[in-house]
């Protein structure tokens, strides 16, 4: 009897050719809907990539369909968050990682600016004091 | 840490920025199976929430549920949630032992009477007055009765606490029963699974932290956000089921191509859990993806449901013949076991009746 390690495992990634799988088509449909809402009403929306079961290669396929735009950002808070605007204006891909670099959530945000990139309102209140402190530390008269 | 601190204050003391807090809330939304857009509302609620007292009682169990939670691969978020609650009593995790540990439990119960969250894992033996499992001289039965009195709500973690689990399997020598058979006057939520997925446990805790209530439940008291869909309905191998492509053995062509595992005994059609979407080990995989059929561990009495490797009741017609007939009749792509009855399936799903393949074919 052959051992498990001798059994080759082959994942047939090409069985559907270049055609998007049903889950990817469903996500694209949602994104399309949110784009229309953003254009018409200026309202943001989200599509959680993990909300539906995806097959091997689906996330990469979705990324390749949406493409890559001009903006890339890294947020360093409780681990790294990667943000990039896709080739479609207003459609952003957000990947939240924890301090161990594991993906804890991944979603598409359809918005003028992703929420995580905006300066938090309450932080703004602290800005004058932080600025004064840094001036005192770093500027020599 | 003061229990009077809000969660926001607690996290800020740990050096978490507001942007980090928003990211934490986004992860919490994901844990609660809510859309990411809810994160600001969660942040608003959590910024005012105080630390709830949590007492965790471990009864007739294998400790797998605690292992599942503490071996979680999402330590930042889960640790933050566990840090956000005041876990005043837990056999495996606490430093105290002996009478000091029991005094901690009694003190926590007295201080937070009517407000603490009681988590139970393990079934409760009842035969012979419950002598088959005791802690500090008290039977599990006595401890549960005493601890449930002042609880705001009870969370039964794992299939043993939720449905009786393995100890409850025939012949059930200890008279093991689930929490719901003993606690009748408090809200009880079941988080079954053998063990449950960690994010499901922390998702329920996150919901309680955020809103101060337990989430909506199904007929088995399981949170709908995690147990609202069957494994079958969310399984990535479902297209193969619909096309009538099944693995017949664990190493044949079908198995290598990742086809449906129905014929190898998969209980996905009759099992409700989040395995197919949330998966295990931080979204790495789940049994079906790893090539093993679902064993139905989040359903009542799954240990007595027959072999894990015997298929669910089979249809009366040959699969290929019926599939061909369906296609010839112009039926929409769907179940290969006959004409697909959407109405009956939808009704059964709403009522969470267990479907058999025969039902799908009727």
Image (spheres, helix red, strand yellow):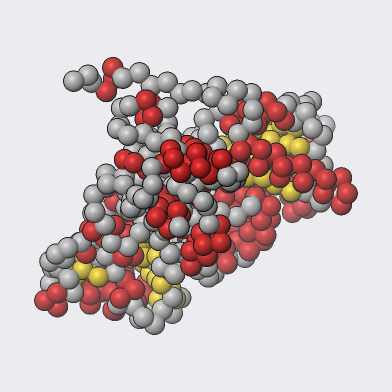
Residue B42 in view: yes
Q: Is residue B160 above or below residue B286?
A: below
Q: Where is residue A48 shown, x and y percent of the image?
A: 63, 45
Question: Could you say which is closer to the camera, residue B195 or residue A34?
Answer: A34
Q: Is residue B324 above or below residue A4?
A: below
Left or right: residue A130 versus residue A78 is: right
Q: Residue at x 64, y 31 (%)?
A: A20
Q: Where is residue B297 shown, x and y percent of the image?
A: 33, 53
Q: Residue at x 72, y 26 (%)?
A: A67
Marks counted in the figure total 0
Q: Is residue B108 above or below residue B299?
A: below
Residue A79: name its quadrant: top right
Q: Where is residue B326 shown, x and y percent of the image?
A: 53, 44
Q: Where is residue B56 shown, x and y percent of the image?
A: 34, 64
Q: Is residue B148 above or below residue A31?
A: below
Q: Quadrant of the C terminus of chain B?
A: bottom left
Question: Could you say which is closer to the camera, residue B17 or residue A47?
Answer: A47
Left or right: residue A54 versus residue B118 is: right
Q: Residue at x 88, y 49 (%)?
A: A40
Residue B98 in view: no
Farthest-out residue, right:
A40
Q: Residue at x 66, y 42 (%)?
A: A26
Left or right: residue B134 versus residue B215 is: left
Question: Could you say which is closer to the camera, residue B79 or residue A25?
Answer: A25
């Amino acid at each position: 009897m052959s051992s498990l390690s001798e059994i080759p495992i082959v994942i047939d990634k090409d069985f559907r050719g270049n055609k998007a799988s049903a889950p990817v088509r469903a996500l694209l449909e949602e994104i399309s809907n949110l784009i229309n809402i953003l254009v018409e009403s200026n309202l943001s929306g989200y599509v959680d990539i993990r909300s539906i079961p995806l097959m091997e290669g689906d996330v990469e396929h979705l990324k390749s369909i949406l493409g890559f735009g001009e903006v890339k950002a890294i947020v360093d808070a409780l681990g790294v968050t990667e943000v990039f605007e896709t080739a479609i204006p207003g459609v952003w891909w957000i990947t939240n990682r924890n301090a161990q670099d594991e993906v804890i959530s991944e979603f598409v945000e359809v918005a003028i600016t992703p929420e995580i990139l905006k300066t938090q309102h309450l932080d703004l209140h602290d800005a004058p004091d932080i600025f004064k402190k840094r001036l005192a530390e770093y500027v020599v008269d | 840490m003061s229990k009077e601190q809000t969660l926001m204050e607690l996290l800020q003391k740990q050096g978490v920025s507001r942007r980090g807090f928003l990211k934490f809330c986004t992860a919490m939304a994901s844990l609660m199976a809510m859309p990411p857009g809810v994160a600001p509302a969660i942040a608003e609620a959590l910024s005012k929430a105080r630390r709830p007292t949590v007492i965790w009682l471990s009864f007739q169990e294998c400790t797998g549920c605690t292992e599942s939670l503490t071996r979680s691969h999402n330590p930042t978020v889960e640790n933050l949630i566990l840090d956000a609650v005041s876990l005043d009593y837990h056999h495996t995790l606490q430093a105290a032992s002996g009478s000091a540990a029991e005094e901690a439990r009694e003190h926590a119960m007295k201080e937070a009477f009517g407000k603490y969250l009681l988590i139970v894992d393990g079934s409760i033996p009842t035969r012979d007055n419950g002598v088959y499992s005791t802690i500090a001289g008290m039977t599990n039965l006595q401890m549960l009765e005493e601890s449930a009195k002042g609880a705001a709500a009870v969370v039964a973690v794992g299939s043993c606490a939720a449905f009786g689990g393995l100890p409850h399997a025939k012949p059930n020598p200890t008279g093991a029963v689930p929490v719901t058979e003993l606690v009748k006057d408090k809200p009880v939520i079941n988080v079954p699974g053998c063990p449950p997925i960690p994010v499901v446990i922390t998702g329920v805790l996150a919901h309680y932290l955020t809103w101060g209530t337990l989430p909506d439940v199904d007929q088995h008291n399981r949170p709908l956000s995690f147990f609202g869909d069957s494994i079958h309905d969310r399984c990535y191998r479902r297209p193969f089921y619909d096309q009538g492509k099944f693995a017949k053995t664990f190493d044949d062509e079908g198995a290598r191509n990742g086809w449906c595992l129905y014929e190898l005994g998969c209980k996905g059609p009759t099992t409700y859990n989040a395995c197919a979407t949330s998966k295990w080990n931080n979204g790495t995989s789940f049994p079906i993806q790893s090539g093993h059929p679902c064993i139905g561990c989040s359903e009542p009495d799954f240990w007595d449901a027959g072999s894990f490797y015997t298929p669910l009741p089979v249809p009366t017609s040959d699969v290929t013949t019926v599939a061909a007939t369906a296609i010839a009749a112009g039926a929409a792509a769907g179940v290969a076991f006959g004409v697909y009855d959407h109405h009956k399936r939808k009704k059964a799903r709403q009522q969470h009746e267990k479907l058999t393949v025969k039902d799908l074919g009727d």
